[in-house]
Image (cartoon, grey):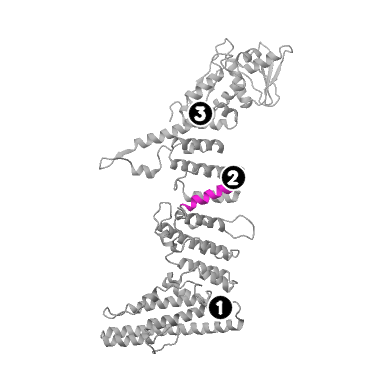
Amino acid sequence: MDKHHHQHLLLQHHQHLHHHQKLSLAKSSRQSCSEWIFRDVPSDITIEVNGGNFALHKFPLVSRSGRIRRIVAEHRDSDISKVELLNLPGGAETFELAAKFCYGINFEITSANVAQLFCVSDYLEMTEEYSKDNLASRTEEYLESIVCKNLEMCVQVLKQSENLLPLADELNIIGRCIDAIASKACAEQIASSFSRLEYSSSGRLHMSRQVKNSGDGGDWWIEDLSVLRIDLYQRVMNAMKCRGVRPESIGASLVSYAERELTKRSEHEQTIVETIVTLLPVENLVVPISFLFGLLRRAVILDTSVSCRLDLERRIGSQLDMATLDDLLIPSFRHAGDTLFDIDTVHRILVNFSQQGGDDSEDEESVFECDSPHSPSQTAMFKVAKLVDSYLAEIAPDANLDLSKFLLIAEALPPHARTLHDGLYRATDLYLKAHQGLSDSDKKKLSKLIDFQKLSQEAGAHAAQNERLPLQSIVQVLYFEQLKLRSSLCSSYSDEEPKPKQQQQQSWRINSGALSAAMSPKDNYASLRRENRELKLELARLRMRLNDLEKEHICMKRDMQRSHSRKFMSSFSKKMGKLSFFGHSSSRGSSSPSKQSFRTDSKVMQRTCASTD
């Protein structure tokens, strides 16, 4: 900190005047002074400033002020006795100090009044041209030798200059203070970094890890800058960026400033939000993502510019894996019939997250394995997928949430983002529960979101009994459960026996709605009802056969424990050949059990798709 913080410059007048007498200032408008500077010399001129009258003498004023000298000279014939000074910077209080200087009365120049005195000396033309060591040179000396060497004093002068624009800017008071602040902040950081360097065990010089994590590297000025008006604060931040102040320090200052200013509920909130967004460093993670979401909420409420909101959405999207569910729950501030939360904004954020690194590859697998520094990592993708599923479950009960918007959020991430579909299934089920009037076609659209092969055992069991799902989806769930059971049975074979050809069945993926044999729209209603009845009967038969399989499996495992002979294994193969889950069993022909079951399953699945479409 500058040791000269409390140092003051004393001004002395060298003319032989009465130094012990004081200038009287009228406190109220149009009130005359009751005391004279010289009691034995009557006043010969009255100066009016902002409604206040100063009864003074011409000689001290014209000896220092070129402006007053010119006014008096122009009215020499009329012997002017009153002068009104319009738009005098700093008002009556500052003029009083300038008048004291003209009379040779001592007073202190400080960081609280130097900007006003600098401006009033220019207004009154109190320069060296009219008197040696005049007010202009005295304030210039104080500004240069005292203020610009102390960051806190520079901030105070900037604060005082807010009401002196544009004159304070034209006189370069603001420019010099801003440059001084930026230079001091940069120098503080450099000095702090050098003071905390240390040598490692290998002899290499590096910064202490504790210092890196503490965030304290000469940033004590952050709180000081928070008192500035947004236009001057913006100029200070831009100057600091040019000087090379660390992005983390810029970000910390922005957070501090926003917390201070945006709690005041002023009429300049929109300008403040838009300005802070433009000042955000380009680097990621220099401000908390919760802070970015807070700015975005304010931007939506205040209806800031489109570019401001899009910039925030892009920044959030680039680090979305750091967000929480509460961050995503942005209230909607439009009309009464709208959704509770702002779905469109969240969708744009998800698109920004998914499109990081550009569209360099169209193949899903290559996108998933991409190690580009700009693309979302596999870990980040999984985190965001879980976050989106939680978000879908939160917004699903909203009665005003259209299916199209629900689908928009659910499909915003690529298919490889989810390795498990339990969260997506839960959100879908909540939507079905809250929107029971959905048509069959809309229910099909919802079920297409879920890959039933990616359900856990618990979620699959729930889905198999979920009457809210379309029948086609239930059949798919049961079919995949059948495949899992067959795989379990297959693993029960001994290593000596050849395994049945079930890998083809395990790899056979059924995507919802991807089967062929859809009915033509021209088919009549009676045919549709007949197919539905057949589907229900087939589904009931399926459940019965599934129960039989479970019982048979238990018995076979018990038998296998008693005997390991090849004769038993041959008998076991014959039993498997008689089992069929999607049609009648038959021992005729030479088809293997797996091929026979595969053909029968395909027919039923095609018929299921046709009847439910």
Measure the alpha-carbon separation of dots 3 and 1: 80 Å
Q: Can residue 41 be seen at all in this image of the molecule?
A: yes
- Name the one closer to the observer, 559 or 491: 491
| Marks 3 and 1, the one that precedes in the sequence | 3
Left or right relative to 173: residue 379: left
Q: Which residue is depicted at the point 49% across and 24% down?
A: 144
Q: Position of residue 480 (x, y in %)?
A: 43, 75
Magenta part of the chain = 306-318
Which corner quadrant of the image does residue 172 belong to? top right
Left or right of 193? Residue 19 is: right
Q: Amino acid at mark 2?
A: Gln
Q: Is residue 165 left or right of residue 596?
A: right
> Please, what secondary structure does the residue beneath circle 3 have?
helix
Q: Label 3: few (<14), some or many (≥20) within 10 Å? A: some
The residue identified by callout 1 is 519
Give residue 333's quadrant in the image.
bottom right
Callout 1 secondary element = loop
Residue at which label 2 appears = 270
- Estimate the spatial distance between the alpha carbons at disc 1 and disc 2, rounded to whole Å: 57 Å
Magenta-colored segment: predominant secondary structure: helix
Q: Earlier in the sequence, mark 1 or mark 2?
A: 2
The reply to whether dot 3 and dot 2 touch (C-beta < 8 Å) is no
Query: Which secondary structure lies at badge 2?
Result: helix
First-in-chain label (3 vs 2)? 3
Q: Are marks 3 and 1 in contact (CB under 8 Å)?
A: no
Counting other residues with Cα less than 10 Å from the Cα at mark 1, is it few (<14), some (14-19), or many (20 or more)? some
Q: Amino acid at mark 3?
A: Arg
Q: Is residue 310 magenta?
A: yes
**Residue wearing tag 3:** 176
